[in-house]
Amino acid sequence: METRTKEWVLKTVREKNVQFIRLWFTDVLGMLKSFAITKDELKDALEEGMGFDGSSIEGYARIEESDMMAMPDPSTFEILPFQPNEEIVIARMFCDIQEPDGSPYVGDPRWALKQNLKKCKKMGYDLYLGPELEYFYFKDSSPAVQTIDAGGYFDLTPLDVATSLRKDTIIALSKMGIAVEFSHHEVAPSQHEIDLRYDEALSMADKAMTYRLAVKEVAMLHGVYASFMPKPLFGENGSGMHTHQSLFKGGRNAFFDKNDPYHLSTVAKSYIAGLLRHAREICLFVAQWVNSYKRLVPGYEAPVYVSWARRNRSALVRVPMYKVGKENATRAEFRCPDPACNPYLAFSVMLAAGMKGIQEKYELPDPVEEDIFHMSGQERQQRGIISLPGSLGEAIAEAEGSELAREALGDHIFDKVIENKRIEWDRYRIHVSRYEVENYLPIL
């Protein structure tokens, strides 16, 4: 594949008659932001960046220091397959956000992930990830929440009427260079999953952002609404972003050891131990919304209990069974993130927790292969199995004192996320819900 340099981008724009280029970046909450430039402005943008007002972007600069620069990353150039007009060709590039003097902006989530990957590289490793982002299709975005199918896990038509939506989404992703392993209907009605092929962490974070937009764009073209809300339906499974991860060193999977009973290296065991030990304090950054904790409850296949296993899907970390000849597939699956998180921050704290385990040589406890959901509280206590935070408020309290998360994200992003989440939690706490009125007003 040809290296995507500035010159390659300019040449491709001429050859493909691209008229507009969208410059993409995210705020601290993981919301995709964009502004468009014309092809005539592209050369200057690639050389000097494009200025914008950062004071209105969540978690960015204060109004008195609002000037920001978006520097396009040529390696992320892709032509968008969902065009409003077939005669108009639009492309996109992800940007690194900079200060006016060209220095990296510390509030840029993409920069934070880059810094963590540099630390990982200094220790000799490259992080590879494979997230499974689940989502729902609804008739529209109204609070009525009307599903479009009654399908279940792996169901095929006619129950799964969204097969064509998934197919068109995969085609769109493929046109943007994003490889898909497989797709299927998930457990809940109208719930679906498209799994992206393993890739290097920064590229995967960019792909996750692109994937979320592609799912929504294709859904709109079909006249339906796609949502990555973690728990939109009462009494049904929520949507997760199970994140498969492994470290590579010199082209070899550093997680594999053929002589270990679990086929896990010392590096892998310490990395997994790091995920487990720091799970509670990083939970806020992988499950960042009030609604995230409606998903993280016992049952519904949600990973609530801090433990690891090979076959047991009630554990927080699952290590898929080794297949002969598939050494590079050795990995750990972290199961509490949801698809509404900011992938740059989520991947950063996961990596930081795992690398802390390696640096400090954490010992991995024994796996728990029993169904933890059916254990009594006393049994879990005897086994030393603790739970993830049960609410956004509890997750904030755990995160506030986390030196690991603060170091991984930097003071600016860390403080902005905590500040934003406190506001969200306070608004939720004082809200009087329909449940309360229906259940308490008649009797109190």
Image (spheres, helix red, strand yellow):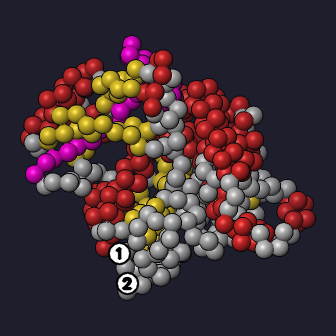
Task: Sort mark 2 into few (<14), some (14-19) or many (20+) by Cα contacts within 10 Å.
Answer: few
**Residue positioned 13% across, 48% down in the render:** 88
Regarding mark 1 in the picture, which secondary structure is present there? helix
* Residue 35 point in image, percent of width and height: 30, 37
**Residue positioned 35% across, 26% down in the render:** 52
Residue 364, relative to residue 161: is it above or below? above
Q: Residue 212 lies in magenta, yes or no?
A: no
Residue corresponding to mark 1: 163
Regarding mark 2 in the picture, which secondary structure is present there? loop
Task: Sort mark 1 into few (<14), some (14-19) or many (20+) by Cα contacts within 10 Å.
Answer: some
* Disc assigned to residue 293: none
Amino acid on which disc 1 is placed: Thr
Q: Is residue 157 left or right of residue 356?
A: left
Q: Is residue 194 left or right of residue 368?
A: left
Distance from the alpha carbon under mark 1 to that under mark 2: 7 Å
Pointers 1 and 2 in contact (C-beta within 8 Å):
yes
* Residue 36 point in image, percent of width and height: 26, 37
Q: Is residue 12 visible?
A: no
* Residue 4 point in image, percent of width and height: 24, 35
Residue 408, by quadrant, is top right
Q: Is residue 14 left or right of residue 122?
A: left
Residue 6, relative to residue 180: is it above or below? above
Amino acid on which disc 2 is placed: Thr
Q: Which of marks 1 and 2 is nearer the N terminus?
A: 2
* Residue 305 point in image, percent of width and height: 74, 59
Specify the segment rendered in magenta.
Answer: 87-112
